[in-house]
Amino acid sequence: MPDRVDVLNYLITLGKLCIWECRKIKRLPNFRMFQKRVGIKRETERFIAYKNKRLPEFCKRWVLFL
């Protein structure tokens, strides 16, 4: 359960960052931009987990969001 809470908190922080960056460049935030960033971050974490032979832990952590 703590892993899922960590992922949820990470997604909230990523959403806030996305909104802040849009305000900085005076652009309206949209959900597709957020989804794209989440996908990039998830794939980066998956790659790191694969390289460190911890793919089952990654899958358990991201199971709700895959």
Image (cartoon, rainbow, N blue to C red):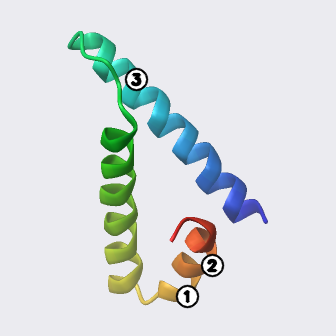
Q: Nearer the viewer, mark 2 or mark 3?
A: 3
State whether residue 26 is above or below residue 63: above
Q: Where is mark 3, residue-wise?
A: 19
Q: Where is mark 2, residue-wise?
A: 60
Quadrant housing residue 33: top left
- Cα separation, mark 2 vs mark 3, equals 28 Å
> Earlier along the polypeptide chain: callout 2 or callout 3?
3
Q: Nearer the viewer, mark 1 or mark 3?
A: 3
Compared across the picture, whether 43 is left or right of 53 comes to: left
Give the x, y percent position of residue 21: 30, 22
Compared across the picture, whether 23 is left or right of 62 comes to: left
Q: Quadrant of the N terminus?
A: bottom right
State whether residue 32 is above or below residue 60: above
The residue type indicated by label 1 comes to Pro
Residue density around tag 1, few if under 14, some if 14–19, many if 20 or more, within 10 Å = few
State whether residue 25 is above or below residue 16: above
Give the x, y percent position of residue 12: 57, 38
Q: Nearer the viewer, residue 50 or 4?
A: 4
State whether residue 56 is above or below residue 64: below
Residue at 32%, 12% in the rendered image: 23
Q: Where is mark 1, residue-wise?
A: 56
Query: Given contact means CB atoms under 8 Å apart, are the residues at marks 1 and 3 in contact?
Result: no
Residue at 24%, 9% in the rendered image: 26
Residue at 37%, 30% in the rendered image: 18
Residue at 30%, 20% in the rendered image: 22
Compared across the picture, whether 33 is left or right of 7 comes to: left
- Cα separation, mark 1 vs mark 3, equals 32 Å
Query: Given contact means CB atoms under 8 Å apart, are the residues at marks 2 and 1 in contact?
Result: yes
